[in-house]
Amino acid sequence: MGVIVKYRMSCAFVFNAFVALGAVDAQADVKLQETYSTYQLQGLSRKAIHDDLHRVAKRDRDGIIEGEVTDQWGWNFRFAATENSCRVTSDEILLKLNILLPIWVDDARADSATRTAWKNYFQELKAHEDGHKTIALEAAEQISKLTHGATAPGSCTALERSLNRAAKQIVENSEKAQDRHEASLPSYSLE
């Protein structure tokens, strides 16, 4: 099943089958994979960097994408049935984060005022994207807490459906938090 939600400068969520190739532990039950990518900006003045940003940055229907965190989710639960109940014997939650940020290649050649302006701009942009990352990590931890060692009366099929519904609800709530975070985007600029 696939559900994709994109945020200008932020996030896309995809539910998929759990694939843990090369995942690293973020916590006992959450596997985190982070991939970083950059795009280069040139210019010796704030205006020149700003103009280059508008020339080379990714775009979507809302405009340029200065920075972006793309989240991809997957989970896998294993169960054991007892007489009249079922319990989760293991749970794996995978969160893949793809983080895109600009780099400025003319730092060494620019004057100190331009370097300071870039530093301030980049710190604010990175802090904003780190906020998106934090929201996603908190949701992954909530799913882990929900599922780890869960037990319920009835069949394992019923427990699995219930846990999948609850995990999807956590991701939907996370998407709303991502929207609120995006709406609180500070106004920072290189101009």
Image (cartoon, rainbow, N blue to C red):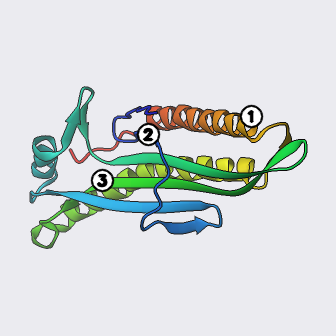
Kindly report which numbered mark, 1 or 2, lies closer to the viewer in this rendering. Answer: 1
Q: Residues within 10 Å of mark 1 (few under 14, many from 20)?
A: few
Of marks 3 and 1, the one in the foreground:
1
Using the numbered discs, state the Cα–Cα distance from disc 3 to disc 1 in whole angstroms: 39 Å
- Residue that numbered label 3 is attached to: 100
For this orientation, the residue located farthest to the top is 61
- Where is residue 1 drawn, in percent x and y? 46, 33
Q: Label 1, on which residue?
A: 158
Q: Indicate the amino acid at tag 1.
A: Ala
Disc sitting over residue 139 in the figure: none
Q: Residue at x 43, y 39 (%)?
A: 14
Q: Residue furthest right?
A: 83
Sort mark 2 into few (<14), some (14-19) or many (20+) by Cα contacts within 10 Å: some
Q: Residue at x 30, y 53 (%)?
A: 100
Q: Identify the amino acid type marked 3.
A: Leu
Mark toward the start of the polypeptide (2 vs 3): 2
Task: Identify the residue at the far bottom of this view.
Answer: 108
Instruction: Reply above or below: 187 against 140.
Output: above
Looking at the rendered structure, the kind of residue marked 2 is Val
Task: Specify which label sits upstream in the sequence, 3 or 1.
Answer: 3
Which element carries disc 2, helix, strand or loop? loop
Q: Identify the residue under disc 2.
A: 14
Pick the residue in front: 18 or 59.
18
Query: Going 57% across and 38% down the picture, which residue do you hit?
Result: 171
